[in-house]
Image (spheres, rainbow, N blue to C red):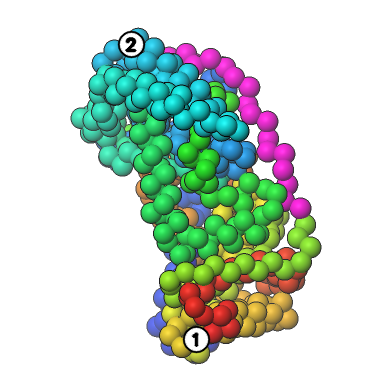
Amino acid sequence: MYTGSIGRCKGVGFSAFLLVVSAFVWIGTARAQTFDSIKKQVKTHVLPNGMKFIVLERHEAPVVSFHTYADVGSAQESYGITGISHILEHMAFKGTRDVGTKDYVKESRLLDKMDDIYAQLSSEERAISPDSTKIKLLKTEFDTLNAEASRLVVTQEYWDLTREKGGRGMNAYTSDDATQYIVSLPSNRLEFWMAMESDRFMNPVFIEFFQERNVIMEERLLGLETRPVGRLIEDFLAAAFKAHPYHHEVVGHMSDLRNISRRDVVNYFHKFYGPSNLTVAVVGDVDANEVFRLADLYFSRIPSAPKPDPLRTIEPEQWGERHVFVEAQSQPLVIVGFHRPSVRDKDDAALGALANIVGIGRSSRLYTSLVKDKKIAIQVGAFNGFPGDKYPNLLAVYAVPSKGHTNAECIKVIEDELTRVIAEPVSHDELEKYKMSTEKDLIDGMKDNSNMAATLTYNDVVCGDWQRTFDVIKDVDAVTVSDVQAVAKKYIVRKNRTIGELIPEGKSNEE
C-alpha cells in the first residue's frame, strides 16, 4: 500500500511551493536515472528445466539477497487441504536427505511407516462405527514411531548452517498468491546458497510434520480464532468470495489442518514446486554470468515437471450487497469492500489512485473527514488488492469508530465520500500527490537489495514480465482525474459491495 506524500495545495507560501517544485524535479530526475539505468543492468537466464533466474549486479557492498518465488499460494488449495501451502512453507526449512538428519535411510523408513499408520488411523476415526480399541493401538504405534524418528532429527540444522555462513533476514512467507523464501548472505557465499537451496527443492524430507502441524494449528487459534478482527476478516472474505479460493484464509480451516497428512504435503510439493513454477531473483555483489553458471550446475539437477494448470475458478458477478456481522468482546469495526479486477487489468493504476486519495494516509479524504473533522473514528484506511491481487480482488476501506460512535455512522461517511468521488472529479492536486508518493516509494524500494529481488520476482510472475518493475510508473503517470472518476463509477456500486461489521457482544449493529 502506498502512503501519501507532500504535494501542492492551495494557499501554501512561496518557500513551500519551491519545496514542492524541487520535489517534482528530484523525483523526475531520479526516476529517469534510476529506472532506466537499473533496468539495463538486469539479466535473466532460464534453465532447461524451466526455472528462471533474474540477476541485478550491485557492487556497493559485499552482500547479496536471494528471493525464491514459488507461484503457489492459498488460492491453489482445494476443499479439504486449505492451509497446506503454509504448512509446506514451514516444512521447507526442516531438512533434506543431507541436512537435518542423523540417518536419512533409517528415518525415511520410519516416516513411511508413520504415513501408513496415520492413513489407517484417519480411516478408522472417520468410519461410521469407529473401533476404539483399534484406534488406541494405532495411536500407540504411531507415537512410538514418531518418537523414534524424532531422535534422528538434527533440529534447525538448515537455519544454523545458514547463520554460520553469515546469513541474515532468512525467512519465508505464504500469501494468497505465492510462497516466498528469502535470505541475504555475504557475496562470497553464493555457491553455498546454490547448494543449500537446490538441495531444499530437490531432496526435501518433511520431518517433524505432525509436530509442525500442531504449531500451525496453534497459530490459527491464537492469530485468528481468538482475535476478533481475525474472525471478522475471515467471515468478510467468505461472504465477499463465494466461488474463488480467496474466500478462505491462508492459515486454512482448523478441520483441514487436523486432517492434512504428510503424504498430502509431499503430493502438493510435487505438483507445485517443479522448477518451471519457481523464479529466483539475485540482487547484490555478484557476477551474473557466475550466477548463471552455478545455477546450471546446481539447479539443472532438478528434473523438469509440467507447470501446474492455471486456476479455473473465476469469481462470478455479485448479484447484490452482502452484509456479515461478527459478535465479539471487542470495540466495533467496519470494513467495506468492492470487487475489482486483477493487477493486470488496465484499470489497476486508476484504482490505485482512487484507493490512495480516498483512504490511504493521514491526508486522505476519509481520514480527514472521519478522524480529524467529525471525530467519528479513531482509525481509517484502505486496501487496494485485498486479499491478493493476482486474481480479481477487492478495493476495501475500514474504520474503527471512536467512543460513543457507531459502525453505521462510519458507513454513512464512507458512502458519502465515495459518492462524492463518483459525482465530482478528484482534484489535480490530489492526483499529483498520489503520483509523487508512488514514484518516491518505488525509488526508495529500489535502494534495498532484498526488496528489489522481491519486486523483480513478483512482476515477472504475477504481471508477466520483470520489466514491469520499471515500467509501472508509466501507467501511474498516465492516470487522469477522469480515469479515477470512471473507475469509481464502474466499481463503487452497491450491488458490488460487501460489508463486514464487528459488533461488541450484547449490542445491536445500530449501537
**Residue drawn at x 73%, y 81% as measured from the top left:** 423
Q: Earlier in the sequence, mark 1 or mark 2?
A: 2
Residues packed near mark 1 inside 10 Å, few (<14), some (14 to 19) or many (20 plus): some
Residue 396, above or below 120: below
- Look at mark 2 in the image and give the residue it sits on: 106
Q: Quadrant of the C terminus?
A: bottom right
Residue 405's tag is 1
Question: What distance separates the C-alpha of mark 1 from that of mark 2?
Answer: 64 Å
Amino acid, disc 1: His
Q: Is residue 409 left or right of residue 143?
A: right
**Residue drawn at x 37%, y 15% as measured from the top left:** 110
Q: Estimate the x, y position of residue 403 in percent, counting from the top left.
A: 43, 85
Residue 143's tag is none
**Residue drawn at x 25%, y 21% as measured from the top left:** 151
Which element is circle 1 on? Answer: loop
- Magenta-highlighted residues: 290-316
Foreground residue, 135 or 95?
A: 135
